Amino acid sequence: MAKVIAVNMSEKKGVPKSPVEKGYFEVEQGLVGDAHAGSWHRQVSLLGLESFEKVKAQGITDLEVGRFAENITTEGIILYELPSGTRLAIGETVMEVTQIGKECHTGCAIKRITGDCVMPREGIFAKVITPGWVKPGDAIKVL
């Protein structure tokens, strides 16, 4: 079963995010209070623990949830295999995948901190279709 491992946020862009008890995801915004929230196609970022394990296998061990600046850390679903347009029920929300991966900007703080940034290859981005709360342990279902 696919599930949420952590909900993470930060007040600044380009830095790792910190886990929170739960997060409210708003239509046309994303995670309320997060630096990346706003009316654009990358409102919410998701990354799987499976991707963390690939980086750990390279010998990088200081990895915690939110380290790659993802809003939602998942387990049990290969996110980067989902096509754009896929809808996911996550907690009380419905989100739609809008982008797989991204271009990593020069001097990426995450890459400097972790040694490798998997978001450009394996992270996905989504917009909020149905608002609501998401917390660790919530199921993730492909609709």
Image (cartoon, rainbow, N blue to C red):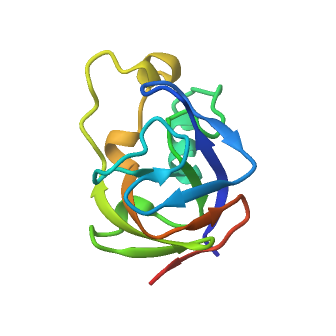
Quarter of the picture holding the C terminus: bottom left
Position of residue 38 relative to residue 11, above or below, is below
Nearest the viewer among 21 and 55 is: 21
When the figure is inspected, residue 113 is found, relative to residue 122, above or below; the finding is above
Q: Is residue 133 left or right of residue 119?
A: right
Left or right placement of residue 78 versus residue 97 in this view: right
The quarter of the picture where the N terminus appears is bottom right
Is residue 107 something one can see in this rendering? yes
Residue lying farthest to the bottom in this orientation: 143
Looking at the image, residue 53 lies above or below residue 91 = above
Image location of residue 124, percent across then percent down? 38, 54
The quarter of the displayed image where residue 95 is located: bottom left
- Left or right: residue 50 versus residue 63 is left
Percent coordinates x, y for residue 33 in the rendering:
55, 41
In this figure, what is the number of numbered marks? 0
- Tell me the residue at 42%/23% (across/down): 111
| Residue depicted at x 63% and y 31% | 63
Residue 22 versus residue 33: which sits nearer the camera? 33
In the rendered image, the vertical position of residue 43 relative to residue 59, given as above or below: below
Q: Residue at x 38, y 49 (%)?
A: 122
Residue 109: image quadrant is top left
Residue located at (50% from left, 35% from top) = 68
From the top left corner, tell me how far across and down residue 115 is, in percent. Answer: 47, 21
